[in-house]
Image (cartoon, rainbow, N blue to C red):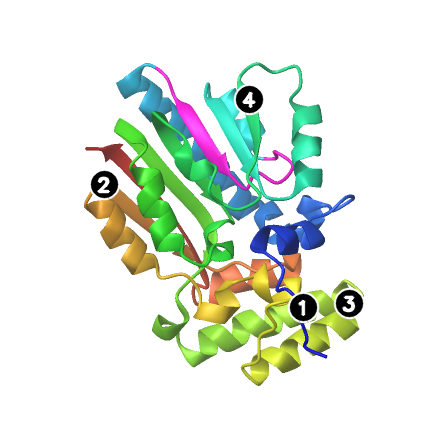
Amino acid sequence: MTNTAVTPSMGELQEREHGVGHDYAKGSPHIRHHTIRDRLIGDLHSLVQEVIGRNGKCHVLELGAGHGNFTDHLLAAGAQVTVTEMSEPSVHFLRSRFRHNPNVTVLHDDDGTVARQAESLDAVVCISVLHHIPDYLGAVKELVEHIVPGGAFLSAQDPLWYPRRSRLSLSLDRNAYFLWRLGQGQLRRGLSTRLRRLRGVYDDTNEADMVEYHVVRDGVDEEALRELLASHFAEVDVQRYWSTQSGLLQEVGQRFCPPSTFGLVARQRR
């Protein structure tokens, strides 16, 4: 009998990983570290205030908003926000959370195309999102086309492109992640995922591999993103830094370990 199994879509894999009861804060503890979180919140406030100063308003498209932990800060800075999510349970959560706020619109983007159809955006924000998108350069190029003159683009918490990183940088990063997984009581998942990746084997039906898509294509090319954005914006700033899930390893790593992660801010859309 012929095997007719269908490979699940990225939206279905995202929903498996981020289904009902998923805790985005626990699942992304690296963003909770005060040095990273405080810098990111500061960047969001600065971005919104700069755009309002130039354009008189700031309509932000926030991709992959999770449960809206950073949406609150965009709103507090004075933005009107459209948020998107692939996971239907997350969409329900967001709609409930912001149901009384007229400045928030929630869209279910199960195939990753709805966000790219938005019109007249003052800014686009992608926090820990681009590494989930197979063709992230194509997606960013499409999004930029919808940003009005004077607008901005911000991304954060994406892994640096592996080929430009040292063996030491990659080893420290992967081992820190593995130790954190063990501390979460996920020994079996951590070991099986680690062994597959050591062998260079990736399962396109397994959310552990496909949702963290950067492991399939060697991270995110920050220089290619910078070049793409530099052709549309007056200023592009790339920030490279160490980031890991463990609080203790973060404190040590940010002092002594080479960068593993990056964010960027592009200002003043031409």
Are the residues tagged 4 and 3 within 8 Å (C-beta)? no
Please state the horizontal and vertical placement of residue 11, each as a whole percent of the image.
60, 50
Q: Secondary structure at mark 1?
A: loop
4 vs 3, front mark: 4
4 vs 1, front mark: 1
Q: Main secondary structure of the magenta part?
A: loop
> Please, what is the three-letter code of the amino acid marked with disc 2?
Glu
> Please, what is the three-letter code of the amino acid marked with disc 3?
Gln
Say whether disc 2 or disc 1 marks the residue closer to the N-terminus: 1
Are the residues tagged 4 and 2 within 8 Å (C-beta)? no
Residue at numbered disc 2: 235
Say whether disc 1 or disc 3 marks the residue closer to the N-terminus: 1
Residue at numbered disc 4: 104
> Please, what is the three-letter code of the amino acid marked with disc 1?
Ala
Q: Secondary structure at mark 3?
A: loop
The answer to whether 104 is drawn above or below residue 94 in the figure is: above
Residue at numbered disc 3: 186
Query: Where is the C terminus found, in terms of image quarters?
Result: top left
> Please, what is the three-letter code of the amino acid marked with disc 4?
Val
Q: Which mark is residue 5?
A: 1
Which residue lies most toward the front here? 1
Disc 2 versus disc 3: distance between alpha carbons?
Answer: 42 Å
